[in-house]
Structure formats: C-alpha cells, structure tokens
Amino acid sequence: MASISYASKEICVKIVYYGPGMSGKTTNLQVIYKKVLPEFRSKMTSLTTENERTIFFDFLPLDLGKIKGFNIKVQLYTVPGQVYYNATRKLVLRGVDGIVFVADSAPDKISENIESLKNLEENLLEYKYKRENIPMIIQYNKRDLRNALSIEEMQEHVNLFNLEWNEAVASKGVGVFESLKLICRKVIDNFIKKHLGSGRQRPRYVNAGS
C-alpha cells in the first residue's frame, strides 16, 4: 500500500492498469509518458524475465500536489494480459493502491474482459486484499471500433461491481488522462480518509501534461 518517506517528504502510491491482452493497457501508459513533461516523470522501464517475453512494468511517477506538506508521487504499472503470465500479474498487484481496469469494447472480447476481472479479484484475495477496499475504475477502451458494444451492453456484462467508468480511445490519446485523473482522485481521497480522518486537507491537483 502507499508508502510514506519522511526523509524525502513524499507519499508514494501505486496504480496498476489491469485487463485482458491487447486491451490497451500499455498504450495508456505510453500516451501518458509522451505527454507528461520530462520534469514530472522518470524513465519508463520494462522487465524481461528468463521464461517470459518482455513485460511492461511501466514505471511513471507524477507529482499531483501536496498533502500536509508531502509531495504525492504516483507509480504506474501494467500487467501482462495473457493468462499464462498470471504469476507476474499477481506480483505486480503487490502493494497496489488503485486499479484501472481497461476493458476492450469489441464484441468478441466480452468473455476475456469478464475472465480478467474474475482473475483480478482472485489475485487480490491471494494478498488478502478486499476488492471493495481498493479504489478502482473501468476504462471502456477502443470506443472507435465500428462494431463496439454500446456502453449499456458494456455496463451490463463488464461492470459487475458498479464501478465508476469512462470511455477512451487510448491509441488516439482520448480519455487517457481522464482515467488517470479519476483514479488518482479516488486513490488520494482513500489515502486521506485512512490516514488523516475527517480533518482533510484537499490535495492540489497538477495538470502535469500542460
């Protein structure tokens, strides 16, 4: 969960982009990385293990403001979508503070979306994390597909937990920062609620990409 460094005066939170293979998780992070000013980001890093292909653990801190004099830093990660990389998916979820579930809007991807959501909940339980206690949103990606399912259909089949959501076309940069801002707001609000109680000091959000 969120780590606090009194030496550097930083609160570091971890957000993971989860979802089925090729749904647009890595594309989201690539778009964010390109648009964020260099002084607001670190180097994007990928990891290749001995038995797996290159898996992107896209590491991207963004300064969002201050809470009680502490800078807020966000680390962004993706998980591999393929089922046979589940051990890596689970590892990336360790210490997660917020999740963006990237759902594919193509009709033939519905079952993969549902399978990935169930897999997410199972992996969270492995760490004894309760899904309802972790801030989470759904990004309905690939809304530009000609045969994209309607939002009503996506809601019915994918949004099993009545989560907040938004639409996106990550390949064109549409909706990417909206998703990021939404999950950051939820993560920071959750942190304030847990650690500062009712005496809340609202963080000042910074538009790092402007």
Image (cartoon, helix red, strand yellow):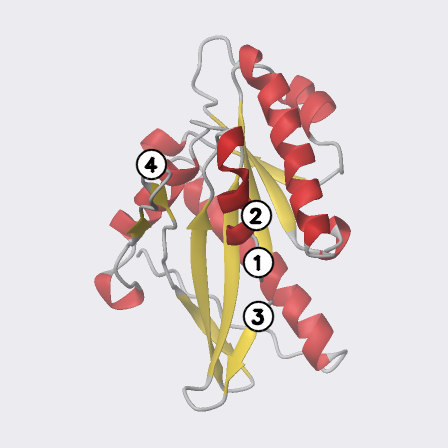
Of 31 and 18, nearer the camera is: 18
Q: Kindly identify the residue that appears in the image at 64 percent across and 40 percent down.
A: 120
Local packing at callout 3 (Cα closer than 10 Å; few below 14, some 14-19, many 20+) is: some
* Distance from the alpha carbon under mark 1 to that under mark 4: 21 Å
* Distance from the alpha carbon under mark 2 to that under mark 3: 18 Å
Looking at marks 3 and 4 on the same chain, the residue that comes earlier in the sequence is marked by 3
Q: Amino acid at mark 2?
A: Lys
Tell me whether circle 3 and circle 1 mark residues in contact (CB < 8 Å): no
Tell me whether circle 2 and circle 1 mark residues in contact (CB < 8 Å): yes
Counting every numbered tag in the picture gives 4
Residue 190 vertical position relative to residue 70 in the rendered view, above or below: above
Can residue 182 be seen at all in this image of the molecule?
no
Q: Position of residue 12 (x, y in %)?
A: 49, 71
Q: Amino acid at mark 4?
A: Arg
* Distance from the alpha carbon under mark 2 to that under mark 1: 7 Å
Say what secondary structure mark 3 lies in.
loop
Q: Position of residue 39 (x, y in %)?
A: 25, 68
Q: Kindly identify the residue that appears in the image at 31 percent across and 40 percent down.
A: 54
**Which residue is labeled 3 in the image?**
2
Q: Position of residue 148 (x, y in %)?
A: 52, 14
Of 12 and 84, nearer the camera is: 84
Q: Nearer the viewer, mark 2 or mark 3?
A: 2
Q: Amino acid at mark 1?
A: Arg
Which residue occupies the extreme bottom position in the image? 7
Looking at marks 2 and 3 on the same chain, the residue that comes earlier in the sequence is marked by 3
Local packing at callout 2 (Cα closer than 10 Å; few below 14, some 14-19, many 20+) is: some
**Which residue is labeled 4 in the image?**
53
